Image: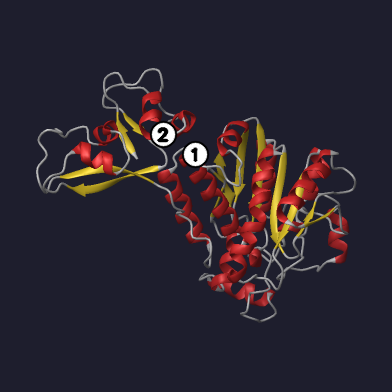
Amino acid sequence: MDIFVRKGDSLWHYSQFFKINLQLIHDSNRDIQVNNLSIGQRVRIPGFVAQEYQIRKGDSLWKLAQNRNLPLEALLLVNPTINPDQLMVGQTIKIPLRITWRLVNGGQTYDYKLLMNDIKRLQGVYPFLQSPSIGNTVLGKNIPEIRIGNGGKKVHYNGSFHANEWITTPVIMTFLNDYLLSLTNQNPIRGVSTSRLYQQSALSIVPMVNPDGVDLVLHGPPANDTWKQKVVEYNKGSRDFSGWKANIRGVDLNDQFPARWELEKARNPDKPGPRDYGGEKPLSEPEAIAMAELTKKRDFARVIAFHTQGEVIYWGFENAEPPESEVIVKEFSRVSGYEAVKTIESYAGYKDWFIQDWHRPGFTVEIGLGVNPLPLSQFDEIYQKTLGIFLAGLYM
């Protein structure tokens, strides 16, 4: 929501009027010199939208403010040109509306278009949210990163490395939405103060690493004739892509990282297909390259990759993980009920590479049970079990 500066205003005043943490207002207005506001300047207030309202007989700004539990100043700030003593029936004004509900509906088929629409909607209401691109897919889709918070602890979450594990994306996006709601309404989540988490951490999220693959699973082959023919060929002539994990080139993105990649390649398929083909070399695919470059650039303290199948949390690799990893995974297990498993005979994954090269905590969280793609009927249960992991990833 936009408001307009009056003489004597400050961002601190706005935080009092709208009951919004001052830091969130600062971070929503990075282009403003906070100690040098000018009259008429636009300021963004997170967590609100301005709703149009037509004046009725007997209305006054004071009554409208009282009915909506807002200070009169809040109405004056969004309506800088009106005279409160000369309201006319039928006149249209704006009224601040605090957002207290989710904008993300995670319990539905969640493709790339829906993801991008949700990011745009969230940014409109929560302008302290940043969403730079980390690169493009084989088919040219932008891969968005979502960034929230400026604290010293840099934490990263990602989902949909594997195409038919797309349910990880709406689970992550639902947590993001709940985190934003908690911050702007100053309500804790499961007793955890998210304002403290925001101050202490910088959260990076790549909610859909493999957009081309997700859309292939959900909608079938792309319109491009060349790729349409290739993916059907890679899929052994079948147009059922429910078993597809790879990117559009038939490369498994979670077998693409230089962490004993040769061992994984030796036992997996040697040509493109729905799953497990690690490519001709590590980091050959643009999606994997984008994730590697992001990880190097951001210097994360810990990473969590969300996958599906098994309700387990993998937390080790070649004994390169630090001692704190075990402490953290025990808390993840406690809050989710998921089993902590140090290692399995698997290589070349994103969290493997992170542990190997940084010697910092890295985790693969396998949500849900059943056959991939997991049914949406599991969504609510999965979210409730993983919510504690999302929070613990920030407070541990």
Position in image of residue 157 (x %, y %): 65, 48
* 283 or 118, nearer to the observer: 118
Position in image of residue 33 (x %, y %): 41, 22
Location of residue 96 with respect to 175 vertically, above or below: above
Mark 2 secondary-structure assignment: loop
* 230 or 142, nearer to the observer: 142
Inter-mark Cα distance, 2 to 1: 9 Å
Locate residue 345: give its quadrant.
bottom right
Query: Which residue lies at the image location 21% right of the left edge and 48% below the top edge?
Result: 53
Classify mark 2: residues with Cα within 10 Å, few (<14), some (14-19) or many (20+). few
Location of residue 387 with respect to 235 vertically, above or below: above
Is residue 20 rendered to the left or right of residue 357? Answer: left
Query: Which residue lies at the image location 57% right of the left edge and 39% below the top edge?
Result: 194
Query: If the image is split into quadrants, where does the C terminus sit?
Result: top right
Sequence order check, earlier mark of 2 and 1:
2
Discs 2, 1 touching: Cβ within 8 Å: yes
Can you see residue 334? Answer: yes
Locate residue 167: give its quadrant.
bottom right
Position in image of residue 126 (x %, y %): 44, 42
Farthest-out residue, bottom? 237
Query: Which residue lies at the image location 76% right of the left edge and 58% below the top edge?
Result: 338
According to the image, what is the colour scheme of the structure?
secondary structure
Reading the image, the residue beneath label 2 is 19
Position in image of residue 170 (x %, y %): 56, 59
Location of residue 306 with respect to 359 vertically, above or below: below
Reading the image, the residue beneath label 1 is 186
Q: Identify which amino acid the numbered label 2 is placed on.
A: Lys
Q: Identify which amino acid the numbered label 1 is placed on.
A: Gln
Classify mark 1: residues with Cα within 10 Å, few (<14), some (14-19) or many (20+). some
Mark 1 secondary-structure assignment: loop
